[in-house]
Amino acid sequence: LGGSLTMPVAPLARMLGVKAVHAGLGYKTLYGIGFAEVTTKGEGFEVVEGEHGLPVVENFDAEITIVSGEKGRGSAFDVGVAVEINDNLYVDVAIINIGQLKWDDAQQRIYEAYIDHEAGESEPQLKETGPAKDLANYAIDAPQTLRAGIGGKAGSFIRWAAEYSHQVKGPGKGTSTFGAGVELAYLKMLPLRLGVRSTSGSSPVYSAGFGINLGLVTIDVGTPDLGAFLGGKSTEWALAFSTGLRF
């Protein structure tokens, strides 16, 4: 639940010699359904070749700490600036989700992980070292993201855009995503769209779609993973459909 406000900053636009500058601020309240954090310390384990060439786990000696909770509450805000350099080019930058989630019911459990070779075991076993410990007002960072974008027009019927984002805090910290897209509106009532994205150097995923503009009524159809429709390997198979009114 939240809201946002965007306002033009005319003095800054005049100072930079650009068409327009807009600054935006958003605020939201957050509700956390649940979370778990797992950390380890110790020697860990080593897989070596055993009898008859079969893999054997050795040297397992670690401590595993699990912190979990439910029903978290918090808040976060977003801040950003968009600069319209001219009619054909714009850039923008924003920081998303500056805030925290607090968990009143967080608990910490500590386990010893070991392998009992004397009992002939080869798989790690877990033994809790004591009762769960309650953690009052335990807080985690919201998934704070830094993003920057650029886009514009090429000719009278081509629009393009690219975006880079980096996860600064929270789950997925250190993850980077790059995406780009182009829209071809040679027929204004039937714009065609193609996009590509890649996360932290993974193989690119292509998306595609089209729109139907019928005066006041707009219809958009697209898929986030074109490879799924072309028989390639995919983790998702989805088709999005939306409609609206444009005044």
Image (tube, rainbow, N blue to C red):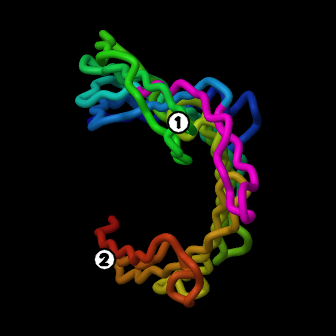
Q: Position of residue 83 (x, y in %)?
A: 65, 41
Residue 116, numbered circle: 1
Residue 134, numbered circle: none
Secondary structure at numbered mark 1: loop
Magenta residues?
A: 44-66
Residue 1 picture quarter: top left
Q: Main secondary structure of the magenta part?
A: strand
Above or below, comparing residue 151 to residue 218 in the picture: above
Instruction: Look at 35% across and 28% down and name the residue there.
Output: 68
Q: Is residue 167 left or right of residue 54?
A: left
Q: Nearer the viewer, mark 1 or mark 2?
A: 1
Between 220 and 154, the one lying in front of the other is 220
Q: Position of residue 181 (x, y in %)?
A: 63, 67
Instruction: Give, as a three-letter code, the residue at label 1.
Output: Asp
Instruction: Give, as a three-letter code, the residue at label 2.
Output: Val
Q: Give the quadrant of the C terminus.
A: bottom left
Above or below, comparing residue 204 to residue 7 in the picture: below
Q: Residues within 10 Å of mark 1 (few under 14, many from 20)?
A: few
User: Marks 1 and 2, Cα distance to the nearest angstrom?
Assistant: 68 Å
Instruction: Look at 36% across and 24% down and name the residue there.
Output: 101
Residue 217, numbered circle: 2
Between 66 and 123, the one lying in front of the other is 123
Secondary structure at numbered mark 2: strand
Can the viewer see residue 227? yes
Q: Is residue 214 left or right of residue 161?
A: left
Above or below, comparing residue 65 to residue 56 in the picture: above
Do the CB atoms of the residues marked 1 and 2 lie less than 8 Å apart?
no
Instruction: Look at 52% across and 45% down and name the residue there.
Output: 121
Between 172 and 89, the one lying in front of the other is 172
Q: Residues within 10 Å of mark 2 (few under 14, many from 20)?
A: few
Q: Position of residue 81 (x, y in %)?
A: 59, 35
Instruction: Look at 43% across and 34% down and name the residue there.
Output: 126
